[in-house]
Image (cartoon, coloured by chain):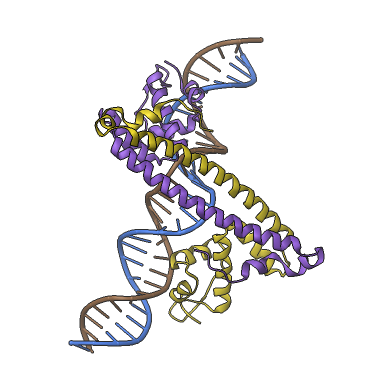
Chain colours: A purple, B yellow, C brown, D blue
Amino acid sequence: MFQIGELSAKTGVSPKTIRYYEQIGLLLPAKRGGNGYRMYDDTDAERLNFIRRARALDFALDEITEILAFRDRGIPPCKYVMSVIHDRIDAIQERIRNLEQLSDELAALYDAGQRLPEDAQMRTCVCHLIQTETNYP
Amino acid sequence: MFQIGELSAKTGVSPKTIRYYEQIGLLLPAKRGGNGYRMYDDTDAERLNFIRRARALDFALDEITEILAFRDRGIPPCKYVMSVIHDRIDAIQERIRNLEQLSDELAALYDAGQRLPEDAQMRTCVCHLIQTETNYP
DNA sequence: TCTTGACCTTCCAGCTACTGGAAGCTGTAG
DNA sequence: CTACAGCTTCCAGTAGCTGGAAGGTCAAGA
């Protein structure tokens, strides 16, 4: 049994965040020592590591909550997890496409600004470039 | 002069958001008609379009506020905008790299789940795959 | 004239996933 | 005895909106 700081060290999740997870019900209320301190064991560390890895995979906390609920009841949530993974991949791909377009547009803007001579930069102003009407989705 | 709904239609920014922008000082307080309704003109539409395009370029609202403050004072904020653009491009590139890694990891997870036969899926559970220790940054 | 419905107003609350800070208790080392 | 790290709770804030309640305004139609 160890305290929240050690759990934090084992999992790389801050104590603040651990308490927050408990507060929102993602973690079950921790056992308390005689001094009122939260006490954890390896099971807790494993559960929190699961959460951390799922978070690193960009799962939302409520998705993780649902997955853990399945897991707690001993039901393998394969289909559910698979569909969540699928949705997430799609969402990430779209986000990447948007960001790439965005990056291109910003780079074009930046290049346009760079190509101006110093004094013209002061007059022409990149704001002007932003002001030109373009269709952003 | 037109109402908030028309400004919304002209710019593609929702009335809610327009009021919010006014509330946080991104838009100056609108003139009011005799009925208390906000009244706008083309200048307002242009300013809001500027904001919308800057937002589409992923500028933060406080960055836009600063840029507009320069613009309002007639000072072309070229250097400032250029540095903001530069920072933003960097940030976007890094975000894209992270998302691509994430996408790859999820795809691997998904493929692993797909390769299981139907009944094994029910037993082996993709959760197990998430549980395997890997180093996510 | 009355009613309907689409506008508009304000204010309050909530979303995600935390994070910061205050005020105070506990435990250990010097 | 005192310092200091670590723990507790609670309150509030972050970004950028969005939803909803409760109510005022206005034009068109029966």
Q: In the figure, is residue D30 to the left or right of A70? A: left
**In the rendered image, which quarter is residue B137 located in?**
top right
Question: Which residue appears at 40% of the width and 27% of the height?
Answer: B131
Residue A62 drawn at (x, y percent): 36, 41
**In the rendered image, which quarter is residue A36 located in?**
top left
Work out which quarter of the rendered image holds the N terminus of chain A and state it.
top left
Q: Is residue B41 above or below residue B87?
A: below
Q: Is residue A105 above or below residue B38?
A: above
Q: Nearer the viewer, residue B81 or A107?
A: A107
Q: Is residue B58 in view from this perspective?
A: no
Q: Nearer the viewer, residue A56 or C27?
A: A56
Residue A100 drawn at (x, y percent): 56, 53
Q: Is residue B45 above or below residue A74?
A: below
Q: Is residue A51 above or below residue C26?
A: below
Question: Which residue appears at 57% of the width and 57% of the height?
Answer: A102
Residue B13 drawn at (x, y percent): 47, 67
Q: Nearer the viewer, residue A65 or A107?
A: A107
Q: Is residue B55 in view from this perspective?
A: yes
Q: In the figure, is residue B137 to the left or right of A91? A: right
Report how many numbered discs are placed on residues in the image. 0
Q: In the figure, is residue C21 to the left or right of B79? A: left
Q: In the figure, is residue B102 to the left or right of A133? A: left
Q: Nearer the viewer, residue A35 or A7?
A: A7
Question: Which residue appears at 58% of the width and 49% of the height?
Answer: B92
Residue B33 drawn at (x, y percent): 47, 80
